[in-house]
Amino acid sequence: MPPTHTNCPISVNPAQTQQQHQQNHDDESDYKLIQRNQPSKSTQQIDENNDATTSQIPLIDRVFPVQIVWRNVALFTYLHLSALVGGYLLITGQVMFNTFLWGALFYFMSGLGITAGCHRYWSHKSYKAKTPLRLLLALFQTIAVQNSIHEWSRDHRVHHKYSETNADPHNAKRGFFFAHMGWLLSRKHPAVKAKGAGVDMSDLEADKIVMFQKKYYLQLVLLFCFIIPSAVPVLVWGESFFVAWFFVTQFRFCVILHWTWLVNSAAHLWGDRPYDKNINPSENKMVAVLAMGEGWHNYHHTFPWDYKTAELGFYQYNLTTAFIDMMAKIGWAYDLKTVPKNIVKARVARTGDGSWANDHYHHHETSEVTEESHVNEEVVDHGHGGPWGWGDKDIPEEDVKVTEILNKLPSEEQLNMNNNNTQNLIEDTSSSLHSPITS
Ligand code: ST9
Ligand code: ZN
Ligand code: ZN
């Protein structure tokens, strides 16, 4: 069905009731709140061929054009049926032990490629990495088959800046299924493309590893996600091709996809909002465990430049933080950005929903933020969006100044920059890729 748009910033479909229209206009005022922090007021409308024209695209509306992509429906149907076969082979003991370990290795590699790689490193620039780690993360990310690093990060940056609007690729206002996987089964809303075009990607476009992976994505995926994981068990320890294909490749791939998608669906719908009650993303422990520490989503959307994506470094709920810390110990990761405790607490008092004090998973020490302080605080509504991370020009200066940067490189250059976060940010924004070892 083609999208219907009018010059009204809130689109009105003839089938809408007056009540729905009113609701849209309520949402419009919602959107104005979002706009307070956004650089441009209007969104360009793009036609079905994605060309920009001058009129507006609604960012909030209740009627969503759905254009199903049947090729994707077929591919995902095959994937899920194959994963069921793989799961059946596992629980009926038909998978050799070596094959199980091999599958687990690919599971963790692909998971970390998404969490530590294209999420915390490339999308948010929450830490820096030396070339060996960048190569490793790019390889891991390829194994996950979640689109190229470039495409994943562009969608993710626009998700942070325009959360829960039409410009959010997996807008959770469209329901659990759409946010979970429906967005991959249909054409993107024109607002995603229009707003996404304004998101700065220059850092990734200057990253040779990212651009190489984008260029040869299909070949790399075939080799690292499908051929190698399925062939090695057969050739090296005599597993049947049937088991290698359905368990190691299809089952492992499908499970990681669902744990990732839960961050967009469950962690945008259910859970506490201790840091900012005005946004949808929430703290969801189940998702945190499954998604290697990525379920503390209210914190993450509030402070997207924090490399831990959570207030605490509890490794059992945040495997990715453990991995990055380990990489920092061997010197492959550095400039780890994090938000000091007192800043977090001030934010909890200002915009939290009051659950922080009750939930001991968020903090080690006794809470100093009381219920009373919530009642007395005037809550500032930030709208839904925010800066996408450390390199975003819209990150507030105050936030940059107070950010703690851990594991700085002991080089002279770094020493000169001590306590000068703004300089660090400028370096990051203008792409530190000019240095042979960093990005
Ligand atoms: C997958 C991704 O699963 C999952 C991402 C999840 C993110 C989670 C985040 C949560 C935090 C991290 C948690 C990690 C937890 C990990 C746990 C591990 C244990 N901006 O896309 P096209 C433009 S992928 C700007 O074809 P359609 C652009 O010009 C699964 N512009 O649009 C583009 O051309 P180009 C496997 C944009 O036709 C053009 O539009 N992959 C943007 O509407 C066309 O783009 C699949 O299934 C933007 N954001 O098609 C593939 N977007 O790229 C599925 C687009 O050349 N995808 N443009 O510049 C598709 O088939 C299609 O994209 C589509 C839309 C059908 C969905
Ligand atoms: Zn994020
Ligand atoms: Zn999110």
Image (spheres, grey):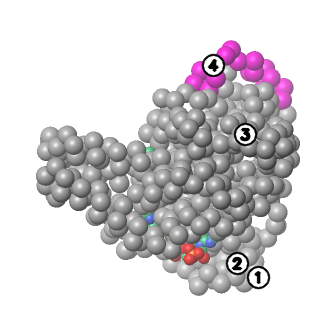
Q: Which residue is mark 4?
A: 364
Q: Is residue 343 above or below residue 57?
A: above
Earlier in the chain: of badge 4 and badge 2, it is 2
Q: Position of residue 37 (x, y in %)?
A: 82, 55
Q: Position of residue 86 (x, y in %)?
A: 22, 51
Earlier in the chain: of badge 3 and badge 1, it is 1
Going by the numbered disc 3, the residue's amino acid type is Pro
Q: Are marks 1 and 4 in contact (CB under 8 Å)?
A: no
Q: Main secondary structure of the magenta part?
A: loop
Q: Position of residue 261 (x, y in %)?
A: 47, 51
Q: Nearer the viewer, mark 4 or mark 2?
A: 4
Locate residue 369 relative to residue 318 in the image: left or right: right
**Mark pair 4, 2: CA separation:** 48 Å
Q: Are marks 2 and 1 in contact (CB under 8 Å)?
A: yes
Going by the numbered disc 4, the residue's amino acid type is His
Residue 102 visible in the displayed image: yes
For residue 45, which numbered disc appears in the image?
2
**Mark pair 1, 4: CA separation:** 52 Å
Q: Which residue is mark 3?
A: 410
**Mark pair 3, 1: CA separation:** 50 Å
Q: Secondary structure at mark 4?
A: loop
- How many callouts does the rendering have? 4
Mark 2 lies within 8 Å of ligand 1 (Cβ measured): no
Chain part drawn in magenta? 358-377
Residue at left offset 81%, top offset 67%: 40
Earlier in the chain: of badge 3 and badge 4, it is 4
